[in-house]
Image (tube, grey):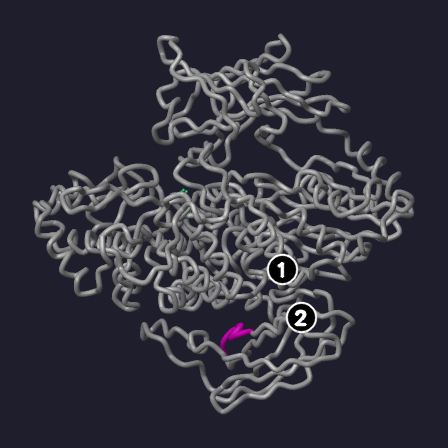
Amino acid sequence: MTDTDATGLEQAVRTALGSLDLERKVRLLTGAAMFALAEEPAIGLPPLTFSDGPTGVRGSEFTGGEQVVMFPSATVAASTWSEEALEALGDTLALEALRQGVDVVLGPTVNLHRTPLGGRLFEAYSEDPLLSGRLAAAYVRGMQRRGVGASLKHFVANEAETERHDVDSVVPPDALRELYLLPYEICVADASPWTVMAAYNAVNGVPATEHGELLNGVLKDEWGYDGLVMSDWFATRRTEEPATGGLDLVMPGPQGPWGEALVAAVRAGRVAESVVDDHVTRVLRLASRVGAWHPTPGAARVAAGDVEGPASPARREQLRAAAAAGATVLTGSAVVGPADAFTPDAPLVLVGRHAVRTTLQGGGSAQVWPPHRVDVEDGLRAALADGALVVVDGVEVRERAEAAGADVLRDPETGAPGLRATSFGADGSELASEVLADPRVVLGFGPGPHSGARWLELAATVHVDDAHGVEVGVIGAGRWTLTHQGTEHTAEVVLPTDDPGAGILTPPSWSTAVAGQGDATLVARVEPTGTSPCLYALVARPAPRRTADVVAEAVEQARGRRAVVVVGLTDEQETEAADKTTLALPGDQDELVRAVAAVAASTTVVVNAATPVLLPWLDDVAGVVVVGLPGQEGGDAVADVLLGVREATGRLVTTWPARDGAGPAWETVPTGGRLVYAEGTAVGYRGWYGAAEPPAFWLGHGLGWSTWAYESARVEPDGAVAVRVRNTGARTAREVVQVYLDPVGAPVRLVGWAVAADVAPGEHRDVVVRPDPRVLRTWDTAAGRWRPLPAGGELLVARGLGDVRLRVPRVA
Ligand code: BGC
């Protein structure tokens, strides 16, 4: 098929609309499968393929698809404050998509970090709308340049997960415009994402999938958006309201509330056929843009076979550098010394469950199956001489057990790595039996060898380092019989929530400690219960140890030596479908840090979490570095940062509270189905600024390798701010120069930033920050329109609002 220009495309769309009857047009407006659209041979339209998501291109299977690149989480990428880095990320995601024949990647997520308790913050960029919007636009540009579509999600006011399918986000109009809609507005204007995803929640009483005022009024009419609006998965519940409200595509399918019901609504005159035609036009425009139908010219597509594999040396180096670049130093230094400072006589002592089992990605639909994982322990072992690293596993950090991986499971029949899954029908006959290298099975989620299963059997030979005993168990809702070395256990595992996605996203588990020596055979048989899709897997891991024993071992090893403690969250907290209830580190991690800090020569803490946590021992340690959820090469990146090989150049993308409950917005639990955004426009640092109790760390904070003098700031006649910074430290380093406006009668806000990279010691760099006009407005609710901010106010040149270096009057 040859490329089609705009006029040619319009003509092709008109011809297609003219040749399809109503039923055929409506068929194109609901997915044909979980992640695919319908084809229409009559007009030469092939099926389009979608895939999650922001952390990697998973493909169309939730488990067991291809091994793909697991990128650092969105917060790590955002912490670079680098549009260049986000553009490169979008580019690589597009290559991952092309490698798998995926047309649209379901990202980026631009919901804001409104409250630090939000479970899904790791997938989104920031509490600041300008930073979120500009970084998202860069990601979309990088991706779409390759002919792969992005999906800006979840439109809009989807800042928490509790009761997410029904919650009504009650947002004042000025906050909606100035904060929550702004990243979408910026991204639409600057990068034209080819799709937008309408959220699960309602906004001010109207479901986001049928919000005519926002979808038709703001997005399509006011912003001139010509792309496609799809629903979040299973979010559409009605027929006419979404169709007339601006939703173009119901996902997934083939079942759904449109189909025949929409045909009938058109026939009865309740929905105009021109509305259907507009939706179909947008589907066809998307097909053209991704090159599947009358290709839009200009995309730099590459053949699948020419794309680097997810474990190629080039990809590994790129991911390692990206993870280090987004690491953020909160206090002191992240550097514990060069690698050769550690020897068998003077080893580095590495402590913590997150050191041996690093949380590399968050939970939920963003999860991917990577080619390998590099934990912090692996990274440091590779970098240090033999015997120069002593590792102490930490206290327990999880409540729900994690699925056992192919590293500890073998097929009992062939010995191949993984799990044998066998399914049986209602009459007891065997349906399918296979060895799964990704040892997780999802039932009830699309077709597959086990889709008709009445019983499922999971069998494996497990090998767990059992010095402290072994814990075995099962994951997934149902009635289980688990046989371990001939001993039978039974369990009824129930899904505690009716969220339709929870069985896959946060599956329940059951486990028990058993005595065990060497290899053991584990056979688990389940009769699935519940009506929603669910994930099934085995648990096999060292039994949890008593905190006192772990602490005693850590203290013994760390005494008088240099120590690194890795603490953090897991995909139990950093996940879709659930919010946090506290910012305290899970388990007894604080106790472990305190004990080590009390005896070690120096203690550096690595925080393996995407979002704020409480650091009650902050004054007792030499340095704290946040590494987020760093992706498949995370451990190597952390080793680079700790050993001074790469600078941790990140700056916080969210303000960190000093205690639970502190901050302008906190609650994620709706009252009577309503989550009221009562803080209005005073979100994040905007709300903290001027408050009596300061936060622990401000958005924009981050120390890196050097110190900086801010020598001058000057406002040019056109409003641009010229800043001179000088590297006053001893190493070449990178600085993020931030400019905030403290306006008259409105909240303080970030208006722009600039990066000064590779500045040598003693050298200066001149940067120019152009305040973005889209944050120099205020929404006049009464008039329903934008007004310029009142004249005056002060520009603050800062390293986060806790470290304002220069102040200059605004010229306006
Ligand atoms: C999530 C979306 C995701 C979709 C498809 C939903 O549960 O909210 O972000 O793209 O599932 O997996």
Look at the image and tell me whether residue 672 can be seen.
no
Q: Amino acid at mark 2?
A: Gly
Which x, y percent locates residue 638? 69, 51
Residue 317: percent from left, percent from top: 61, 52
Residue nearer the viewer, 494 or 11: 11
- Which residue sits furthest bottom? 717
Disc 2 on helix, strand or loop? Answer: loop
Relative to 775, is 277 on the left or the right?
left
Residue 751 is a magenta residue: yes
Residue that numbered label 2 is attached to: 802
Give how far across and how far down residue 444 sits, in percent: 38, 28
Q: Quadrant of residue 172?
A: bottom left
Q: Residue at left 45%, top 64%?
A: 138
Mark 1 vs mark 2: give the one in front.
1
Instruction: Find residue 349 and report its image quarter.
Output: top right
Residue 484 lies in quadrant: top right
Label 2 near ligand 1 (CB < 8 Å): no
Q: Mark 1: which amino acid? A: Ala
Residue 277 locus on image (x, y percent): 15, 53
**110 and 760: which is toward the camera:** 760
| Neighbour tally class for label 2: few under 14, some 14-19, many 20 plus, Cα within 10 Å | some
Looking at the rendering, the stretch of residues picked out in magenta corresponds to 745-753
Q: Secondary structure at mark 1?
A: helix
In three-dimensional space, the C-alpha distance between marks 1 and 2, rounded to whole angstroms, equals: 22 Å
Residues at marks 1 and 2 touching, judged by CB atoms closer than 8 Å: no
Instruction: Locate residue 394 relative to residue 419 in the image: left or right.
Output: right
The residue that disc 1 covers is 325
Task: Count numbered badges in the picture.
Answer: 2
Mark 1 / mark 2, whichever is N-terminal: 1
Which residue corresponds to the image point at 85% horizontal and 36% vertical from the top-left?
Answer: 552
Does 2 lie within the magenta span?
Answer: no
Q: Does residue 779 sit above or below 21 in this rendering?
A: below
